[in-house]
Amino acid sequence: WINSYKRVNPGSPFGGVGKSESQKTKSILVDNGFSSVLVITTPEQEETGLMMAKQLGELAVGVYPHAVMHVPTGVADEAIQFATKKNIDCCLALGGGSTIGLAKAIALKTGIPIVAIPTTYAGSEMTTVYGLTENNLKKTGKDIKVLPKVVIYDPELSLTLPAGISASSGMNAMAHAVEALYAQDKNPIISMMAIESIKSLSQALPKIVKNSQDIEARKQATYGAWLAGICLGSVGMAIHHKLCHTLGGTYNLPHAQAHAITLAYSAHYNRKADIQAMDQLAQALGGQSHEQVGQLIYKLNQQLGIPLALKDIGLPEDGPSEVARITCESPYYNPRSYERDELETLLQRAYLGLEPR
Ligand code: NAD
């Protein structure tokens, strides 16, 4: 689960890709034997990509600014064609989970290795998981080919991520760490990393919401997100990820916000399923007992100004019962059984944004 190289590098000037950052990236690319690199971004981050490409000089063949959320197959096919035609030997994914997702689609088909520079806290850079969406259906799979060969963490690149998106993206990361605590294949090292991740994120995110330019908080959040990404890439996820997969796949809810809201309810649902782990979770969040985990996460979301109700991010009225049905019909592993009525009641509370109970 450890990619070949990673580091936390507070190297670039405020909000963009600076010269020293690009020089370091350049030497990493050269050290890894790459000579023809395609920089991939979303349309919104094209300018950052252009800055990076400019400073990489002859190493970069250009910028491909067409990444969008959930990797539609049409978008992936065009990118694969483009990459093949350009005869590149590396995709440099500069952005969040959507950008890294498109690079993964290219890697899956062509074997072209990825160097990732994540700029959100989603954690995709540390996993072998890829996703592709066709006819509104998102399919995921695992393949070692899509695991980035190199990951470069630079907290300064997250300074431009708006506070609200940072908060929900950070809670998306926390969800990976929380589920790692009660994973089917959990182990003591991953649990230690998960707790460290949860502590770091819960301390850093309120500071980022107060001041999105707080570089110390950005470093702490990047550290927490890196640990969470390792958790996600190392052990299996459970009911929470199943619920969010359904919320995203069936209702196209925004990924990070859906994770942030739902985490309070899934943790509450599992609070007695692994008491030792959930006591640890409560303590990492400043509480004492497993009974509190749902409320502690709910209050943290409240403090971060994250929308609290699934209805406010697009879930329709019949969503709770439909999500409970789909989840129970094709469940992931979970440390306790899937009780459809109980889940539906909890999802109703999540729909309305009421504290988990
Ligand atoms: P995202 O990549 O879609 O980014 C959200 C928006 O923020 C985009 O417009 C992006 O351009 C912008 N942005 C990103 N970083 C920025 C920055 N530093 N400054 C300014 N703007 C910035 O969002 P995400 O939550 O990171 O990724 C979501 C996607 O990743 C989903 O499709 C999800 O399924 C996938 N994902 C996959 C895995 C995996 O292991 N395969 C893990 C987590 C998420």
Image (cartoon, rainbow, N blue to C red):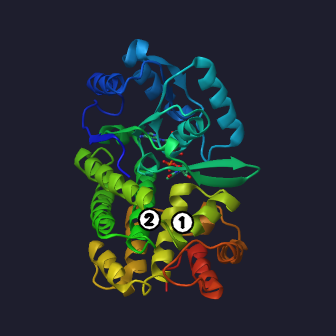
Amino acid tagged 1: His
Q: Is residue 285 above or below residue 70?
A: below
The image quarter containing residue 278 is bottom left
Q: Nearer the viewer, residue 277 or 145?
A: 145
Residue at image position (48%, 33%) is 113
Q: Is mark 2 within 8 Å of ligand 1?
A: no
Residue positioned most to the top: 58
Q: Is residue 356 visible?
A: no
Amino acid tagged 2: Ala
Q: Which mark is residue 293?
A: none
Q: Earlier in the sequence, mark 2 or mark 1?
A: 2
Residue 92 point in image, percent of width and height: 45, 30
Residue at mark 2 to residue at mark 1: CA–CA distance? 8 Å
Q: Is residue 9 visible?
A: yes
Residue holding disc 1: 241
Crowd tier of the residue under label 1, counting other residues whose Cα lies within 10 Å: few below 14, some 14–19, many 20 or above: some
Q: Nearer the viewer, residue 55 or 331?
A: 331
Q: Which mark is residue 175?
A: 2
Residue 26 point in image, percent of width and height: 33, 23
Q: Is residue 177 left or right of residue 207?
A: right
The image quarter containing residue 83 is top right
Q: Is residue 231 above or below residue 94?
A: below
Residue 133 point in image, percent of width and height: 68, 48
The image quarter containing residue 125 is top left
Residue at image position (49%, 49%) is 128
